[in-house]
Amino acid sequence: MNFTGEQIERYSRHIILQDVGAQGQKKIMEGKVLIIGAGGLGAPAALYLAAAGVGTIGLVDGDQVDLTNLQRQVIHFTPDVGKPKVASAKEKIEQMNPDVQVVTYEEMATASNISGIIRDYDFIIDGTDNFPAKFLINDACVFGRKPFSHGGILRFDGQTMTYLPGEVCYRCVFKGSPPKNAVPACSQAGVLGAVAGMLGTIQAAEALKYFVGKGELLTNRLLVFNALKMNFRTVNIKRNKSCPVCGEKPTIVELFDEEQPVCDLRKEKE
């Protein structure tokens, strides 16, 4: 890949980095990242990956922009309310960096379509906000041998880990969705908007490090943080031999859609 003069100037801060350089930037520009969920996590991840010059960014989301999204989903603006999230996000990415090809999927990821969607991408980012989607992404990436970044946020807390084929997967740590009324959604319990930005940019950094091949990814480690106290810690995790999807005797051998557990906060208070 021969850089144009404009590209050399645009990506100069990467090119002068010893651990990135021209070769690293070339790898970034040849990379393909799929972001599932163009919301709180997907928004900052998409913006930083676009700014970095990732060659192709895929966006999967079937929702429209809602006024409540704007508190944290920084890729969407007030005039975008009512517009499909993938269309809104594509507009901003193309305005930020015309080098980036944006592919949109105005649909939710399901057991019937996810394998076909992830097939052509090098790295997957989980920007979803519910447990069934997170387990589906994990299972599809394990079956398809696709690296991905898991991310989850609630209130002031965030957690993330990176999966590489053969390493610890999400189900090694969390076998399945929590029971009903165990964990509320962000729409019920709230989330500090900046927490989404903190977590989403970490996921973007993991993708860029993966392409460049430098540093240490969050494989076999779970990073958790609390923004209220500004505490960060990493927990070392081991591959679970009895994991239902990647263990020695897997019980999950095909993709399926789990039912979303419902949390009724009013019942909790009664």
Image: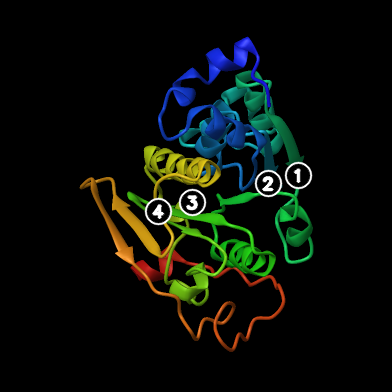
Where residue 187 is drawn, which disc sits there?
A: 3
Circle 4 — which element? strand
Find the distance from the CA under tag 2 to the CA under tag 4. 20 Å
Residue tagged by mark 1?
106
Q: Say which quarter of the image contains residue 38.
A: top right
Q: Quick one: label 2, few (<14), some, or many (20+) residues within 10 Å?
A: many
Q: Quick one: label 1, few (<14), some, or many (20+) residues within 10 Å?
A: some
**Reading the chain from its start, which is encountered first: label 2 or label 4?**
2
Q: Please name the amino acid that badge 2 sits on.
A: Asp
State the residue lying farthest toward the bottom.
Answer: 249
Find the distance from the CA under tag 2 to the CA under tag 3. 17 Å
Find the distance from the CA under tag 3 to the CA under tag 1. 22 Å
**Reading the chain from its start, which is encountered first: label 2 or label 3?**
2
**Reading the chain from its start, which is encountered first: label 4 or label 1?**
1
| Callout in the foreground (4, 3) | 4
Q: Quick one: label 4, few (<14), some, or many (20+) residues within 10 Å?
A: many
Q: Please name the amino acid that badge 3 sits on.
A: Ser
Where residue 154 is drawn, which disc sits there?
A: 4
Relative to 10, is 240 above or below? below
Q: Is residue 59 visible?
A: yes
Q: Position of residue 62 (x, y in %)?
A: 71, 47
